[in-house]
């Protein structure tokens, strides 16, 4: 008899399952996708969407349509609790969904609580990536007036790309802006010194101020207070202080890793509940911590496809073996990129060309629901 598979979050790790959803349906199973929006935005092209290098319809997947066109159903809602004993999911709307097998791909969020007391439209966490589109819509009309004061807090890869692409947004709209990146102790801490130097040079060439050795402490009114007691005024501030999974697993009494992610074995299966799976930023891989990068989410796709079907039908599962090193290419917003893999660093137009090629190829594979014909 067919079973019920629930996919929570249509993020990067679930795309292959969604693409092959009819396989599940043809075998008599029901599949439901739950997500807060019909769309999912691809983070790798998010900063480029902020600058306008990419149009929103080039950067998003229509998860709802992808599921429904293949015989699944879509529920626009958010899972807030799991009841593993009864195999039910509690949704924000108050509704419940039963499952036989459930897979989580709910991603991660920017921890904001220590920084702000109330959300505002000019305080922009860099996740979800849709926020970058809203920020673009907020900034563009204001570029016609006086200088726009933009601050980015967080000196990791996301903070760097957002800063660099803000510059492009201002330039292409013939606006005036002052862009400051508050990088914490060091820009791109933990990456190679060469990458750091190239990034710093690229930003300073364009008149962007990078503040190192200071941290954002509190965002109040229209200014950000730093740990040395000074403060900086802003019109818009982007928060890129790293990411963490939501507390949904720990809140539900399901074993979670130190970062709060669903603790999974190499089958991407909860260490305590064999019918619960997960992939992407929301999991904590028990064997070793994995960086919160899309590369792992993408590589987990075929494993989840195989193992979810195996869990429904009592078959053999595949093992996820994470790659040791991965490549990152930063979109520097000026048509150039910085590629970094282990000891190899490469900067220039070709590096961005490669990133653009890889990203567009990825989008072509999963944009199967007429996304590109849509209007913004
Ligand atoms: C600006 C930026 C640029 C980046 N660039 C790169 C890059 O170039 N390369 C790279 O490897 N990594 C990059 N990353 C990291 C990358 O974003 C993450 O590793 C990747 O998004 C993880 O994918 P995911 O599918 O796990 O999560 P997400 O992409 O966050 O997807 C999670 C999905 O789950 C949904 N969801 C969330 N909560 C719930 C809930 N409670 N119930 C139901 N659904 C829910 C969300 O709506 C979303 O659709 C970047 C990150 C940022 C912020």
Image (cartoon, grey):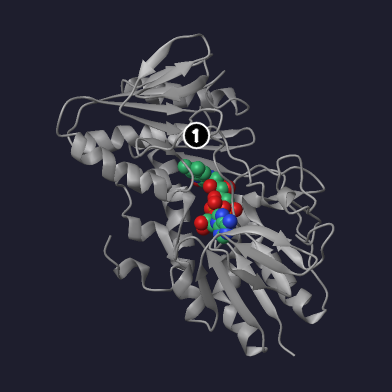
Instruction: Using the rendered image of the protein, determine whether residue 34 is visible from the camera's viewpoint.
Output: yes
| The CB of the residue at mark 1 lies under 8 Å from ligand 1 | yes
- Which secondary structure lies at badge 1? loop
Q: Quadrant of the N terminus?
A: bottom right
Residue 175 left/right relative to 51? left
Q: Position of residue 373 (x, y in %)?
A: 30, 70
Residue 91 left/right relative to 41? right
Q: Is 254 or 129 nearer to us in this picture? A: 254
Question: Residue at horizontal 71%, vertical 49%?
Answer: 251
Q: Position of residue 216 (x, y in %)?
A: 50, 21
In this view, 30 is above or below 235: below
Instruction: Using the rendered image of the protein, determine whether residue 353 is visible from the camera's viewpoint.
Output: no
Residue 59 left/right relative to 305? left
Question: Residue at horizontal 60%, vertical 51%?
Answer: 295
Q: Which residue is mark 1?
A: 240
Q: Is 285 or 282 nearer to us in this picture? A: 282
Residue 176 left/right relative to 167? left
Check the image and name the residue furthest to the front: 94
Within-10-Å neighbours for mark 1: few <14, some 14–19, many 20+: many
Q: Position of residue 301 (x, y in %)?
A: 64, 64
């Amino acid at each position: 008899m067919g079973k019920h598979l629930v996919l929570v979050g249509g993020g990067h790790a679930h795309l292959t399952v969604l693409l092959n959803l009819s396989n599940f349906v043809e075998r008599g199973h029901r599949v439901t996708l739950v997500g807060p929006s019909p769309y999912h935005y691809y983070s790798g092209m998010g900063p480029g969407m902020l600058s306008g290098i990419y149009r929103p319809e080039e950067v998003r997947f229509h998860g709802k349509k992808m599921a429904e066109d293949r015989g699944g159903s879509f529920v626009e809602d958010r899972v807030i609790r799991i009841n593993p004993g009864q195999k039910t999911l509690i949704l924000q709307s108050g509704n419940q969904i039963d499952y036989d097998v459930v897979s989580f791909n709910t991603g991660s969020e920017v921890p904001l609580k220590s920084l702000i007391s109330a959300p505002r439209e000019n305080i922009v966490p860099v996740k979800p990536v849709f926020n970058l589109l809203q920020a673009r819509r907020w900034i563009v009309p204001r570029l016609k007036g006086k200088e726009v004061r933009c601050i980015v807090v967080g000196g990791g890869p996301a903070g760097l790309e957002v800063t660099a692409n803000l510059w492009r947004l201002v330039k292409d709209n013939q606006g005036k802006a002052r862009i400051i990146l508050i990088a914490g102790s060091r820009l791109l801490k933990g990456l190679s010194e060469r990458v750091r130097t190239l990034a710093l040079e690229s930003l300073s060439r364009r008149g962007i101020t990078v503040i190192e050795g200071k941290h954002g402490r509190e965002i109040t009114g229209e200014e950000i207070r730093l740990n040395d007691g000074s403060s900086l005024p802003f019109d818009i501030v982007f928060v890129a202080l790293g990411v963490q999974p939501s507390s949904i697993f720990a809140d539900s009494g399901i074993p979670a890793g130190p970062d709060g992610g669903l603790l999974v074995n190499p089958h991407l299966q909860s260490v305590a509940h064999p019918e619960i799976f997960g992939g992407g930023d929301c999991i904590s891989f028990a064997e070793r911590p994995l960086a919160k990068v899309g590369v792992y989410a993408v590589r987990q796709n075929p494993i989840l496809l195989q193992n979810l079907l195996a869990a429904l039908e009592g078959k053999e599962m595949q093992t996820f073996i994470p790659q040791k090193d991965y490549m990152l290419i930063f979109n520097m917003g000026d048509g150039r990129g910085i590629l970094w893999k282990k000891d190899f660093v490469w900067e220039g137009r070709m590096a961005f060309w490669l990133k653009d090629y890889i990203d567009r190829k990825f989008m072509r594979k999963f944009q199967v629901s007429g996304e590109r014909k849509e209007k913004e």
